Image: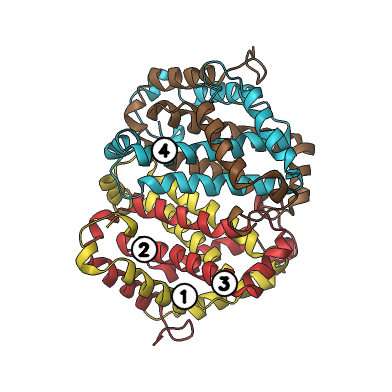
Chain colours: A cyan, B brown, C yellow, D red
Amino acid sequence: MKSLNDDKTTVAELKARILAFVHEREWEQFHAPKNLSMALAAEAGELMEHFLWAEAGASRDIAKNDPARRKKIEEELADVIIYALEFANATGIDVAAAIESKMEANGKKYPVEKARGRSEKYTEL
Amino acid sequence: MKSLNDDKTTVAELKARILAFVHEREWEQFHAPKNLSMALAAEAGELMEHFLWAEAGASRDIAKNDPARRKKIEEELADVIIYALEFANATGIDVAAAIESKMEANGKKYPVEKARGRSEKYTEL
Amino acid sequence: MKSLNDDKTTVAELKARILAFVHEREWEQFHAPKNLSMALAAEAGELMEHFLWAEAGASRDIAKNDPARRKKIEEELADVIIYALEFANATGIDVAAAIESKMEANGKKYPVEKARGRSEKYTEL
Amino acid sequence: MKSLNDDKTTVAELKARILAFVHEREWEQFHAPKNLSMALAAEAGELMEHFLWAEAGASRDIAKNDPARRKKIEEELADVIIYALEFANATGIDVAAAIESKMEANGKKYPVEKARGRSEKYTEL
């Protein structure tokens, strides 16, 4: 029986679920930031593998219209975010605050009037 | 003025903030799953760069005791999760449900009695 | 004065150059396979950053027609291969033999008559 | 019958072998720099997966003393270098010249007397 969804689940609840899973298995000893950053990057690589040879436009279809593929993509994304949140657990980072703070900085680097419809890096806008 | 923190912020609220930022800049056109998976992996690589040559144990200190370094690590982690959540936006994935589902599967692959205190892959337990 | 080029430089010569650089700086102590695999993945992420938002076709032009960008891409690729060859140094892997062996295996997974003009993984051909 | 080894094989010979494999399968159409950089990063992630939870020192043993594991590590490293060399093929980069040039630049950033026995980034030496 599924009980979580994005509308009602806080970041803290997800972090706590993950921490409980880790704690039950006594895995904190392995979860140094170095190791978690590796696991995160490795999972991000696995997510990417679904899209290596597709055009960008076609990658929208891959993620939407093929149920078996979509299931795998959901699992890879979940792995990525699990490791990211466990990294936050291990380092004591408040994810929502960090995101808010980073988006404020991004907003200054990419002001709407300059960045609209453009994909250049802020150093080239 | 900061207003978000993990205790009170839902995943849906974070996703909506990110989507608003993207929409304002008309960046949906660039945010194909393929491209977002690349950006996510690239940011995960940047997070990892903080820990390349440190022993795992020392990486715990890097992330905690050096304020300038910690600030950068928070920013990199934020970038990773921003792209992960925007990937979820672009593909319509419910992150909390995907994590719950993946953790159930992980729980079967790594039963507590077999996995306790061990770092082997489930195929080797 | 440049002296190396692909036509006349053996893999062993490149490996020896890199090892000499590392040895002079007493960096062997940091070059555990774990650490080198992280550095390699991080550099691969940096190479990828040049192509995040471009269409695949446009990425051919980026790498060819913009001299400043091309110079950076060459540097990132060099970093990737330097770490890959140093990984081979640290683990005693013969790169040419490993590539020959892997391409034989790939040839069986992707026979010409089945794989021609197709990008699917061998499990889906 | 194996015929290649690092002592006698030039980079150009490896590049030509890989290009022939690709050409025979008419895969040049998929091998845009964008796509190859993704495949390279994904393979680097797979190489890294062998070392996620091991201490750096233990990772030296993993790569040396476990024959089955070592075989897989050789294959992952081969995949990484195959994609790196095919990236060079697709973009016309001379790998040996790029490495020589990058190592000269690295030598200036990391002069022996300052960098000896230290793992800090050049900006922190």
Asked if badge 3 and badge 2 are on a common chain, one would say yes
Asked if badge 1 and badge 4 are on a common chain, one would say no
- Give x and y (percent) for residue D81: 45, 66
* Residue matched to label 4: A71
Label annotation for residue D88: 2
Q: Residue at x 66, y 52 (%)?
A: D121
Q: Nearer the viewer, residue A49 or C47?
A: A49
Three-letter residue code for mark 1: Ala
Q: Is residue B57 at all visible to an observer of this figure? A: yes
Left/right of residue A109 with respect to residue A118 in the rendered view: right
Label annotation for residue D68: 3
| Badge 2 element | helix
* Among the 4 quarters of the image, the one containing residue A70: top left
Mark 3 or 2, nearer chain start: 3
Mark 2–mark 1 Cα distance, whole angstroms, equals 19 Å
Mark 3–mark 4 Cα distance, whole angstroms, equals 31 Å
- Give x and y (percent) for residue B35: 38, 39
Mark 3–mark 1 Cα distance, whole angstroms, equals 14 Å
Q: Identify the image quadrant of the N terminus of chain B.
A: top right
Q: Residue at x 69, y 58 (%)?
A: D54
Dot in front, 4 or 2: 4
Mark 1–mark 4 Cα distance, whole angstroms, equals 34 Å
- Give x and y (percent) for residue D50: 59, 60
Q: Chain of mark 2?
A: D
Asked if badge 3 and badge 4 are on a common chain, one would say no
Mark 4–mark 2 Cα distance, whole angstroms, equals 35 Å
